[in-house]
Image (cartoon, rainbow, N blue to C red):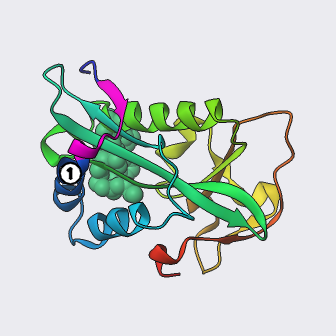
Amino acid sequence: MSTWTTRAEAPGDIPAIRHINLEAFPTAEEADLVDALRADDSAWIDGLSWIATTPQSAPVGFALITRCHVDDQPALALAPCAVLPGSQRTGAGSAAIRAALDAAKAMGETLVLVLGHADYYPRFGFTPASEFGIRAPFEVPDEAMMALVLDENSTPPAGTIRYPSAFGV
Ligand SMILES: CC(C)(COP(=O)(O)OP(=O)(O)OC[C@H]1O[C@@H](n2cnc3c(N)ncnc32)[C@H](O)[C@@H]1OP(=O)(O)O)[C@@H](O)C(=O)NCCC(=O)NCCS
């Protein structure tokens, strides 16, 4: 495991973030999604786009959290998460995700939702969203739609997730 440095996205990081997403995914869909979310004031939250860098400050990993809703209650969506292929499985993704989640918690946010690998996200505390009565707005395996309650004193809203329009769902 390498030691990764994390920091919130700065304007100069935008090309590197696009590069990471283009390299990590088979198509440009996720890279385009990140750019569309950044352009959507109702979805983008400054300080919740995080990168993991090498000690030389080269961006390697990325995690983005944006605004979504559960019915009409505000929540957060973690997506996408991406790491340059040559550096995957060395902790960069986890470092970026943990930093983004910590930042969201520090902002007083209470609930994060993620659609993803059921054997990856539980390490951050995510559990099936269905346990909270939270449903995806599309068909998805139950274990892939997960929720993390950031504030244990809060009761997460039950309902259907409404994603920003950039997600196209
Ligand atoms: C998924 C991803 C962000 C994880 O980041 P990472 O830095 O590679 O992962 P970490 O080093 O933090 O954690 C490693 C663990 O992640 C898990 N993991 C990584 N990729 C996984 C995948 N595609 N499916 C399931 N688990 C995965 C493994 O359990 C791995 O543990 P191991 O070392 O025992 O194999 C990264 O691998 C990636 O960019 N993958 C391609 C794009 C993608 O699928 N993104 C997620 C959907 S938005």
Q: Position of residue 26 (x, y in %)?
A: 20, 68
Q: Which residue is mark 1?
A: 20
Q: Quadrant of ligand 1?
A: top left
Q: Position of residue 142 (x, y in %)?
A: 64, 65
Q: Quadrant of the N terminus?
A: top left
Relative height, residue 109 to residue 141 (above, below): above
71 displayed left or right of 29: right
User: Toward which corner of the image does residue 139 lie, by quadrant?
Assistant: bottom right
Q: Which residues are magenta?
A: 5-13
Q: Residues within 10 Å of mark 1 (few under 14, many from 20)?
A: many
42 displayed left or right of 90: right
Q: Could you tell me which residue is drawn at 78 percent across and 55 percent down?
A: 131
Q: Is mark 1 within 8 Å of ligand 1?
A: yes
Front-lying residue, 78 or 17: 17
Q: Secondary structure at mark 1?
A: helix
Q: Position of residue 5 (x, y in %)?
A: 30, 23
Q: Could you tell me which residue is drawn at 83 percent across and 58 percent down?
A: 157
Q: Could you tell me which residue is drawn at 20 percent across and 37 percent down?
A: 59
At label 1, the amino acid type is: Ile
Q: Position of residue 14 (x, y in %)?
A: 24, 51
User: Toward which corner of the image does residue 93 lie, by quadrant?
Assistant: top left
